[in-house]
Image: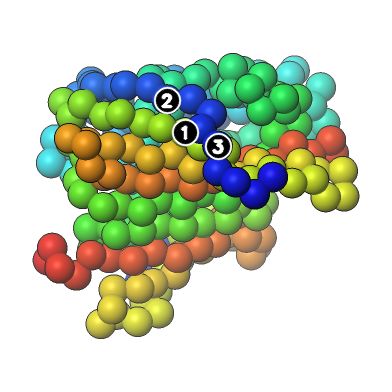
Amino acid sequence: MKEKTELYRYSYTIDPNRVRAFQQAVFEENSNEQFPPTFPTAMDFHGGLPFQKLTELLQFDPACVLHGSQSYEYISPLLPGDQIEAVVYMAGRTAKRGMTFARLETVYTKENKPAVISRSTLIEQKGDTHV
Amino acid sequence: MFNPIPWIITADDIRAYAEASGDNNPIHTDPAYAKKAGLPGCIAHGMLVMALGSRALKEWGAVPLASYDVRFQGMTFPDEPLVVKGSWINEAEGKGSIIIESETGEVKMKGTFAVNRNEQ
């Protein structure tokens, strides 16, 4: 599958309490001015789909899911209190040597302009490695 | 090269990250489930390791980020001594590389970052 298709979308208001809790969990000082760079993926779980629902949607066995890669492109700053629209796309799905690779792309839009783009590869591997 | 940062992720850190991030895959927090999935025990979220990397970038002054791109290459276990290393590939252009490995040199995460020079 090569064409990008929409998987799901959600709206999310960035909750300052969740940002503070996240900063604490990733060993960062609490700051309202600096947004944790990897927080968008937490927004997907809090505002989008929980892990189990995501694996159902991908038709992945939740016990065999690897996180292969992750990238973020930061276009404009996100801050606590911002209202975000997120659209999650399936950017590709391939199978190789008993593994299935799902490439997801999420575009986080603030005030109708893309603010952050996240790209990840999730792998279903019936084997010995998990991340 | 930036100053390497030693770090240890504990089981409590992993539980706190699961709660704060909403990533509740039980292989990270439930030892019985992790063993059923073929693992020796619970492992850290790749995203917690990546966040450890972005924390290091901040400490090194490599901000604000324009991009951050990593591959997860190995499992990270609770209490495993880690080292976060980074360096500029092209400082003038704000491009650098980052790697997180165990004390014994097993690579956990490897990637690149770019700093937005226009905002500095």
Q: Position of residue B62 (x, y in %)?
A: 27, 64
| Residues at marks 1 and 3 touching, judged by CB atoms closer than 8 Å | no
Can residue A45 be seen by looking at this rendering? no
- Quarter of the N terminus of chain B within the rendering: bottom left
Mark 1 vs mark 3, CA separation in Å? 9 Å
- Residue at x-position 44% and y-position 39%: A106
Q: Position of residue A79 (x, y in %)?
A: 18, 36
| Residues at marks 3 and 2 touching, judged by CB atoms closer than 8 Å | no
- Residue at x-position 40% and y-position 57%: B68
Residue that label 1 marks: A88
Disc 2 marks which amino acid? Arg
Residue that label 2 marks: A9
Question: Residue reaching furthest right?
Answer: A97
**Residue A18 vs residue A12, the one in the foreground:** A12
- On residue A5, the disc is 3
**Residue B20 vs residue A102, the one in the foreground:** A102
| Residues at marks 1 and 2 touching, judged by CB atoms closer than 8 Å | yes
Q: Position of residue A58 (x, y in %)?
A: 66, 28
Question: Where B119 sits versus A45, above or below?
Answer: below
User: Which chain does the numbered disc 3 sit on?
Assistant: A
Mark 1 vs mark 2, CA separation in Å? 6 Å
* SS for dot 1: strand
Rendering quarter of residue B38: top right
